[in-house]
């Protein structure tokens, strides 16, 4: 079974999220949307669109999005079979959070690594 197949998103906190979002938009040309981030659509070597995106987002330092971690970031990893991976991680003694979300955006689960960082596991919807 494959475990992680790629990075689905990078999320981090900022003391002044609005100002930092504006900085990235102005200086690096990232198309920051009102929700605080952007979706980078995947392309092949020739620039042709492929199925898949990577989300990039800045949240307020006060956000509880990464709870129960105190880290200022969270990485979202793409996986092929979320339920199978969660089962194996639990069997291996990993700190897998109980909640699993299943929505139109895909399936999500979370695990806390040995350093206390929250990691998001994401199985995209079929075709993405």
Image (cartoon, grey):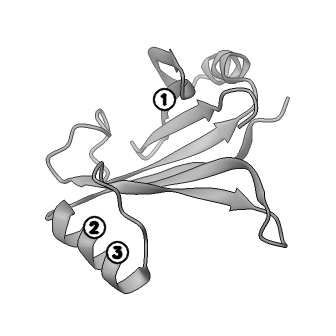
Q: Is residue 57 visible?
A: no
Given residues 71 and 5, the one toward you in this image is 5
| Mark 2 → mark 3, Cα distance in angstroms | 6 Å
In this rendering, is residue 103 above or below 34?
A: above
What residue lies at 18% left-to-right and 53% top-to-bottom? 61
Q: Position of residue 20 (x, y in %)?
A: 24, 71
Q: Which residue is mark 3?
A: 25
Q: Quadrant of the C terminus?
A: top right
Cα gap from disc 1 to disc 2, whole angstroms: 26 Å
> From this viewpoint, is residue 35 visible?
yes
In the figure, is residue 55 to the left or right of 27?
right
Look at 60% across and 43% down and name the residue there. Answer: 77
Give the mark toward the camera: 1 or 2.
Answer: 2
Judging depth in this view, the residue of 95 and 9 nearest the camera is 9
- Which residue, given by chain and number where applicable, does mark 1 sit on? 110
Q: Are the residues tagged 3 and 1 within 8 Å (C-beta)?
A: no
Tell me the CA gap for discs 3 and 1: 29 Å
| Residue 18 occupies quadrant | bottom left
Q: Secondary structure at mark 3?
A: helix
Element under disc 2:
helix
């Amino acid at each position: 079974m494959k475990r992680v197949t790629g990075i689905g998103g990078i999320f981090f906190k900022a003391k002044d999220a609005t100002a930092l979002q504006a900085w990235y938009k102005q200086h690096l040309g990232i198309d920051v949307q009102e929700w605080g981030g952007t979706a980078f659509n995947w392309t092949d070597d020739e620039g042709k669109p492929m199925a898949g995106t990577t989300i990039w987002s800045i949240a307020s330092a006060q956000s509880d999005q990464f709870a129960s971690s105190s880290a200022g970031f969270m990485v979202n990893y793409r996986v092929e079979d979320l339920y199978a991976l969660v089962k194996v991680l639990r069997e291996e003694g990993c700190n897998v959070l109980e909640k699993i979300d299943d929505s139109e955006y895909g399936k999500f689960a979370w695990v806390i690594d040995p350093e206390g960082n929250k990691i998001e596991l994401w199985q995209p919807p079929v075709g993405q």
